[in-house]
């Protein structure tokens, strides 16, 4: 248990020490998106009745930033440790697979939440209301970061080189997060693209997170919770098994 | 009574390369043991298997009686490994590094021991310096400290003195000797054979994944032709000494000297034959000669 706490603390310190790059930078990026898109699209129809496009955009951007940063945290930490070789200091002590997994996962969630708070803080003056359903909000924030954090652990373990990880990030994570209804309500899409969006788990995170703010969304929050929760549990069990088997970590 | 380390028929392949080929030996409690062999012999591969960093294809390894696969937790608590590659985490200071390492082993409040380790390894004034700002030799010392945070009874050092200056090498060995005297079992690999010769009581030699020698240092040394005496003489070598002659070199006769008492006899034979000794020197065989001989397939 103390091994888990130590690794968790180390992972938190790791990103906190370079907070300018790991927290400030994504917050600034989200702010830029918010400024540009709300300027360009402020005349856009209301996404939901009574919700301006500018306000609609904020939770989506926040959740997207959370997801991307949760992924970046575990994946980059692991690949750096693997490439520099200092992962050996985690493999020599008796840290169990659940402790190893849990520490990286929780640190990713914390990084995601910190970034999410930062994004909400700097974009709130664009007209965000207080959350209508704070519990739903929290549930999707945590589970969403959890899914991407676990995926980051998997990618970090799997990749042998930085460019493999970059490929994973650019060809899987970025499209999934961008094409998830961050910038639009999927109800405005043609039927084909709407069905495609329904296959994207990140869509449910963003939709659920938005429900937390506005009390209305494209699909039922229960459906979103089931998809995001299901992904989280399945992915976690799978990644934990990978770690326990020593896949790519113990030759 | 269990062994500190027991290695039983351990094999490991990398694709077509047999990195470990049925290695078996034991290391007893409190021993100071050297594992020698040329580059690529399989020393690091064997150590990785002991540490659970890699898994042997077959065979069994126990550390203080605990199987490294089935009882990995107990085995890892008993083992401290200094890896061969120089690695460090650039995000943290020396003290943070050691505090985290203690935590990974489940140890809280380890400051007293960490302070002692820092002191013994001459790192006290670097405690709050970032790992990045240390010289290579200092990083190596931190790695030694990291291997010791949990006070393991069995300590394995994979070439700990590579890239380390003479002064540190000596202080490092003094520290390791102290640990050994306090009852820790030490296994080391090194390419400085004089280190193994000076420190270790037993020596294993590996080559191409196989164990080719495993003996007490003294046995190993004495079995290999022992000493030689080199003589420059005023006349020819007397016939009675011919059987001892090994070779002639730069006008000197090199004779085998199975034990030092034989020198007396050599000198009296020379006196009898009225041959004068102009120069005489005795060479002890050292580990290096034994090593080279074994590695070239020679028999002892
Ligand atoms: N991960 C790996 N994949 C493939 N081959 C490997 C791997 N690790 C080691 N080997 C090979 O196994 C053999 C033994 O390597 P090992 O590192 O154990 O040698 P060593 O005795 O420690 O050598 P050195 O004195 O250079 O440290 C070498 O031929 C090496 O190339
Ligand atoms: Mg080696």
Image: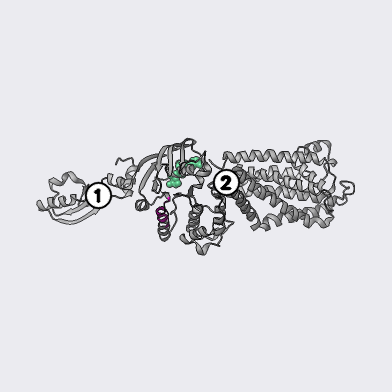
Q: CA distance from mark 2 to mark 1?
A: 52 Å
In the displayed structure, does residue A61 sit left or right of residue B4?
Answer: right
Chain of the residue under label 2: A
Mark seen at residue B227: 1
Is B176 in the magenta? yes
The quadrant where residue A25 appears: bottom right
Residue drawn 83% across and 53% down? A130
Q: Is residue A10 left or right of residue B283?
A: right
| Mark 2 neighbour class, 10 Å CA radius: few under 14, some 14 to 19, many 20 or more | many
Along the line of sight, the residue nearer the viewer: B181 or B222: B181
Instruction: Report x, y in % for residue B102.
Output: 55, 53
Classified by dominant secondary structure, the portion drawn in magenta counts as helix
Q: Where is residue B79? Give x, y as percent.
A: 48, 47
User: In the rendered view of the protein, which quadrant contains the C terminus of chain B?
Assistant: top left
User: Which quarter of the image is occupied by the N terminus of chain B?
Assistant: top left
> Residue A217 in magenta?
no
Judged from the image, the secondary structure of the residue bearing numbered disc 1 is strand
| Residue sitting farthest toward the bottom | B125
SS label for mark 2: loop
Instruction: Inspect this view and state whether residue A31 appears.
Output: yes
Residue B62 circle label: none
What range of the chain is rendered magenta? B175-184
- Is circle 2 on the same chain as circle 1? no
Closest to the camera, between mark 2 and mark 1, is: 2
- Would you say the beta carbon of the disc 1 residue lies within 8 angstroms of ligand 1? no
Residue A95: numbered disc: 2
């Amino acid at each position: 248990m103390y091994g888990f706490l130590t690794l968790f603390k180390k992972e938190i310190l790791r990103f906190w020490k370079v907070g300018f790059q790991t927290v400030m930078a994504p917050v600034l990026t989200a702010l830029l998106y918010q400024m540009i898109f709300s300027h360009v699209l402020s005349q856009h129809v209301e996404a939901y009745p009574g919700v301006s496009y500018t306000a609609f955009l904020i939770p989506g951007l926040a959740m997207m930033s959370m997801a991307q940063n949760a992924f970046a945290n575990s994946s980059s930490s692991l690949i750096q440790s693997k490439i520099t070789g200092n992962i050996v200091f985690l493999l020599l002590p008796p840290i169990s697979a659940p402790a190893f997994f849990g520490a990286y996962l929780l640190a990713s969630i914390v990084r995601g939440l910190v970034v999410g708070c930062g994004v909400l803080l700097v974009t709130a003056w664009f007209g965000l209301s207080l959350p209508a359903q704070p519990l739903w909000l929290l549930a999707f924030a945590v589970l969403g970061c959890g899914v991407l954090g676990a995926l980051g652990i998997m990618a970090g373990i799997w990749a042998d080189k930085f460019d493999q990880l970059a490929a994973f990030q650019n060809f899987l994570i970025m499209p999934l997060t961008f094409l998830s209804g961050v910038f639009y309500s999927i109800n405005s899409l043609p039927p084909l693209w709407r069905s495609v969006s329904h296959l994207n788990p990140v869509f449910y995170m963003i939709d659920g997170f938005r429900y937390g703010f506005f009390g209305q969304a494209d699909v039922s929050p229960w459906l979103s919770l089931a998809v995001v929760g299901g992904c989280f549990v399945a992915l976690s069990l799978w990644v934990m098994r990978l770690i326990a088997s020593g896949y790519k970590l113990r030759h | 009574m269990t062994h500190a380390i027991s290695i039983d028929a351990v094999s490991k392949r990398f694709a077509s390369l047999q990195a470990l080929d049925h290695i078996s030996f034991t290391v007893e409690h409190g021993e100071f043991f050297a594992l020698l062999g040329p580059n690529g012999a399989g020393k690091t591969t064997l150590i990785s298997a002991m540490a659970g960093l890699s898994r042997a294809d077959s065979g069994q390894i126990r550390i203080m009686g605990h199987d490294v696969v089935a009882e990995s937790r107990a085995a890892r608590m008993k083992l401290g490994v200094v890896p061969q590659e120089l690695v460090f985490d650039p995000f943290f200071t020396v003290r943070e590094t050691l505090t985290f390492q203690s935590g990974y082993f489940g140890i809280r409040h380890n400051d007293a021991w960490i302070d002692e380790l820092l002191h013994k390894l001459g790192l006290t004034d670097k405690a709050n310096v970032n790992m990045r700002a240390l010289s290579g030799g200092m990083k190596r010392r931190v790695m030694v400290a990291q291997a010791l945070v949990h006070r393991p009874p069995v300590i394995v050092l994979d070439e700990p003195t590579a890239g380390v200056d003479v002064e540190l090498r000596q202080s490092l060995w003094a520290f390791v000797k102290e640990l050994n005297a306090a009852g820790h079992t030490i296994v080391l690999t090194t390419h400085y054979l004089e280190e193994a010769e000076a420190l270790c009581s037993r020596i294993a030699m590996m080559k191409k994944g196989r164990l080719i020698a495993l003996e007490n240092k003294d046995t190993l040394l004495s079995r290999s032709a022992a000493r030689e005496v080199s003589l420059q003489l005023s006349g020819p070598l007397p016939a009675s000494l011919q059987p001892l002659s090994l070779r002639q070199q730069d006008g000197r006769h090199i004779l085998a000297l199975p034990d030092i008492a034989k020198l007396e006899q050599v000198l009296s034979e020379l006196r009898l034959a009225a041959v004068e000794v102009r120069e005489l020197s005795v060479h002890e065989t050292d580990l290096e000669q034994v090593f080279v001989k074994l590695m070239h397939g020679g028999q002892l």
